[in-house]
């Protein structure tokens, strides 16, 4: 467990240390946020705030993970690559936004094609891995469900859905990073517990079981590093934010969260632990669907956190309530591993 703590502290320290370097650099390069005209009017004051700050905690996650998990890399390294892959997509999107000074960035079809590619690679890797396979753990029932070849499209759907849900949640100061912090801390506990209890996906020999435990421990370190990166980033991203993570950070966090869920094999806990992410995505789907079908809106504005803003709740109150709700749901999810 001490390596988990070391990874968290190192990741947070690297992220915090990069702040005084990266934030002024982003300002000099004029990499400022371009607020949507249709967004909340209160957000217009945030115009020009440096974006792409997710680079800070991505560096922290890389440092924290690689420093303490090199003894077992068959799960932690793909999780890192997934995080970096989605971060690259977000970086290109952010770069085009700040370069052209609009809110479009990459075209929707361009983003979804690359996301399908990354999701497909990760899903196939998990399917073929002797430590993951096609079975998922049914939380609270202590049962397994073998999806067979349908595992790959199912996981691809979960990965893409998670990445875009986290991206939609990144709309208030400290919201995505705060919720992701709670989620990642919980996943580090789950991976550590699994590395001790050894819920193996199939019959394994003693040597393979030992290696599986080491892989799970490395994933616990990865999850702790993600939590540390989010913790350090809150130093600059909590209200009033001095820097935004941009799509660079939100897509990277989405990739990390999806990888943690899939490699834990308890992927069905993701909608519970990440209910706030799910709420953001569902609110947008309902809003768009309702307007196209009935020409009426369900919410004052989507995603859901903007609806609460327009109801008069402050950003800090919304963020704190999202974090409290995530904490409660994560604690409930831990009961599945009694």
Image (cartoon, rainbow, N blue to C red):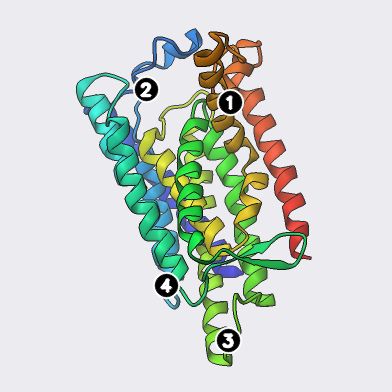
Q: Secondary structure at mark 1?
A: helix
Of tags 2 and 3, which is closer to the observer? 3
Query: How crowded is the residue under tag 4: few (<14 C-alpha within 10 Å), some, or many (20+)?
Result: some
Residue 144 in the image, given as x and y percentages of width and height: 67, 68
User: At x 52% / y 65%, what residue is drawn?
Assistant: 219
Residue picked out by circle 3:
204
Closer to the chain start, of discs 4 and 1, is 4
Quickly name the residue at label 2. Answer: 49
Nearer the observer, disc 3 or disc 4?
A: 3
**In the rendered image, which quarter is residue 261 located in?**
bottom right
Choose mark 2 or mark 1, whichever is in front.
1
- Residue labelled with disc 1: 283
Residue at 56 percent of width and 63 percent of height: 147
Give SS at disc 3. loop
Between discs 2 and 4, the one toward the N terminus: 2
Q: Position of residue 185 (x, y in %)?
A: 61, 53
State which tag comes first along the sequence, 2 or 1.
2
Query: Which residue is pictured at 62% across the width and 77% down the height?
Result: 200
Q: How many marks?
A: 4
Q: Are marks 4 and 1 in contact (CB under 8 Å)?
A: no
Residue at 59% across, 23% down = 305
Seen from the viewer's position, the closer of residues 301 and 16 is 301
* Label 3 close to label 4 by CB (< 8 Å): no
Q: Compare marks 3 and 1 and give the one earlier in the sequence.
A: 3
State the CA–CA distance, disc 2 to disc 4.
37 Å
Element marked by disc 4: loop
- Residue of label 4: 73
Mark 3–mark 1 Cα distance, whole angstroms, equals 43 Å
Mark 3: few/some/many CA within 10 Å (<14, 14-19, 20+)? few
For marks 4 and 1, give the one nearer the viewer.
1
């Amino acid at each position: 467990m001490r390596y988990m703590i070391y990874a968290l502290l190192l990741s947070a320290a690297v992220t915090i240390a990069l702040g005084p370097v990266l934030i002024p650099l982003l300002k000099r390069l004029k990499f400022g946020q371009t607020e949507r005209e249709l967004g909340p009017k209160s957000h217009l004051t945030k115009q020009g705030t440096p974006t792409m700050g997710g680079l800070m905690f991505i560096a922290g996650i890389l440092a924290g993970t690689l420093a303490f998990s090199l003894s077992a890399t068959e799960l932690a390294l793909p999780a890192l690559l997934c995080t970096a892959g989605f971060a690259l997509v977000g970086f290109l999107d952010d770069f085009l936004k700040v370069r052209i000074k609009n809110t479009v960035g990459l075209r929707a079809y361009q983003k979804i094609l690359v996301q399908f590619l990354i999701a497909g690679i990760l899903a196939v890797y998990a399917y073929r891995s002797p430590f993951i396979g096609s079975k998922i753990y049914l939380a609270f029932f202590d049962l397994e469900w073998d999806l067979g070849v349908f595992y790959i499209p199912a996981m691809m759907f979960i990965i893409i859905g998670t990445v875009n849900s986290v991206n939609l949640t990144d709309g208030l100061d400290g919201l995505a990073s705060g919720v992701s912090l709670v989620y990642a801390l919980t996943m580090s506990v789950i991976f550590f517990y699994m590395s001790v209890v050894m819920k193996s996906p199939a019959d394994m020999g003693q040597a393979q079981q030992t290696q599986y435990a080491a892989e799970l421990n490395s994933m616990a370190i990865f999850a702790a590093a993600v939590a540390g990166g989010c913790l350090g980033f809150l130093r600059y991203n909590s209200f009033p934010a001095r820097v935004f993570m941009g799509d660079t950070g939100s897509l990277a966090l989405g990739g990390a969260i999806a990888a943690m869920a899939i490699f834990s094999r308890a992927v069905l806990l993701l909608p519970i632990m990440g209910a706030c992410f799910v709420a953001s995505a569902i609110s947008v789907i309902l809003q768009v669907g309702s307007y196209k079908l009935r020409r009426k809106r369900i919410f004052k504005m989507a995603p859901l956190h903007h609806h609460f803003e327009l109801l008069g709740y402050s950003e800090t109150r919304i963020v704190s309530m999202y974090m409290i709700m995530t904490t409660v749901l994560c604690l409930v999810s831990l009961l599945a591993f009694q």
